[in-house]
Amino acid sequence: MTPVIAIVGAGPAGVYAADILRTRVPGVQIDLFEKLPAPYGLVRYGVSPDHPRIKKIQDALHEVLEHPGIRLLCNVEIGADISIAELRAAYDAVIISTGADQDAALGIPGENLPGSFGGADFVAWYDGHPDAPREWPLEAESVAVIGAGNVALDVARMLITHAQDLAHTDIPDHVERAFAQNPVKDLHLLIRRGPADVRFSPLELRELGSRRDVDVIVDPAELVLDEHAERMIAQFSQRRTIVRTLTEWAAIDPATRTASRRIHLHFYQQPARVLGEERVTGIEMERTRPDELGRIAGIGELIHHEVGAVYRTIGYRSSPVPGAPFDEAAGRVPNVGGRVLDADGSPLPGLYATGWIRRGPVGLIGSTKSDAAETVESLIEDLSTKARVDPESSARVRERLTGVVEWDGWLRIDAAERQLGAERGRERTKIVDREDLLDYATDRTSTAEHAR
């Protein structure tokens, strides 16, 4: 009997799992459920508009979803439209792949003051997530971004880039208008560790230095390398490249820095307190120092940066999926080899996890392929001993769902976005409003009507 599998989450992790399943299990039928009206998850709603190279991953995901053995079912929310228990009863296996959508907390005083923002919320806004607010208070001339990973670079780059330099991207109209009014002059990128221990990719770091009318300022004194840093750059070519780039920026003659916007990179500083009463007026950082193994500790010396906004980009965490176990401390679904575990640590029959909700938000988008492969191996192994469900049960699930956006509906949305983009001389302009997305999916409106 041909197995029927449900996957919850149509981002890269879910699509990769579907692709591996269809190649490993001949004839398998896969229903791919997605809460939003559009697929692709992190690629669509978590990659900066000025990164079309990474957004091209969407083309590869598109090819997978075209396969006749995969049914795309968007606009279906687990816990509202259908439960995990119902899916487990109707499918031979269920894979959870809902990713990570929340900001990790700093845990410092003042973190929740007005003007202190989570990086995930900001990314969702500028990427046109249907559930993000339409307005964003870009009001500060001086801002701080806390973090040492690529999300911190994305947030910093988007905040400091002039709006006209984003005009060729798929940026939503309301976001472009907001960036056109952005008064920022100075951005402080605050990093807890030293230059040899950041988690930036070299390419994304260099992009900071390629922004028009933006100077990057690095203090040469913060680039002095200890024994640990020397070992790191000797062992890892990427870290060597990063330090080389920073050294080049530190050597620039200050007299040549005439840009209207500036990025200041600060190393060996960890957040101690967000300052302000009614809203953010600054941030207090504590100087850090590494030991011989590179472990960081505060030394009690405090540094004050006057800023009007703080962006926290120290990592993501997953949201619980209703009806599935969740480890609040770890921020992910408990599992072994992708098999989801119950409260006693025993595998729940037919329930699996892959991607960031399985292992935490680490690694690049492509790294979820190996993660999906391990989960699928566990699933295939279990199928050989598991009793199969009635093959008509999944059909009954689909029949009772309403408002579902299937593959043809997504293609209509895609075509509408491309038409809107062509009118502006770009590849696409993203449609943001959920009702607009649903209207296009069901052919209830036209692109011309939307544009008016």
Image: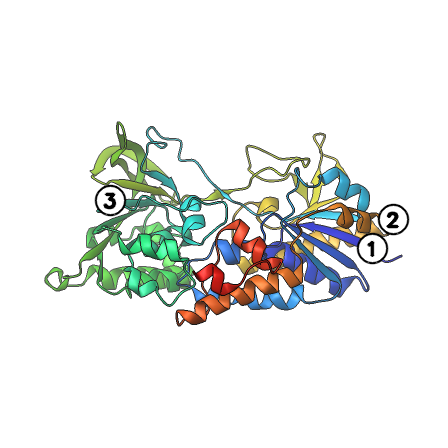
Q: Residues within 10 Å of mark 2 (few under 14, many from 20)?
A: some
- Residue at the spot of label 3: 140
- Residue at the spot of label 1: 3
Q: Quadrant of residue 51?
A: bottom left
Q: Earlier in the sequence, mark 3 or mark 2?
A: 3
Q: Position of residue 353 (x, y in %)?
A: 67, 46
Label 3 vs label 2: CA separation? Answer: 59 Å
Q: Which mark is residue 166?
A: none
Above or below 162: residue 89: above
Q: Amino acid at mark 2?
A: Arg
- Residue at the spot of label 2: 388
Instruction: From the viewer's side, name the closer residue of 259 and 329.
Output: 259
Q: Earlier in the sequence, mark 3 or mark 1?
A: 1
Question: Residue at the spot x=31%, y=33% of the render?
Answer: 272
| SS label for mark 2 | loop
Q: Amino acid at mark 1?
A: Pro
Q: How is the image coloured?
A: rainbow
Q: Amino acid at mark 3?
A: Ala
Instruction: From the viewer's side, name the closer residue of 447 and 202.
Output: 447
Label 3 vs label 1: CA separation? Answer: 55 Å
Q: Quadrant of residue 307?
A: top left
Quadrant holding the N terminus: bottom right
Q: Position of residue 260 (x, y in %)?
A: 17, 58
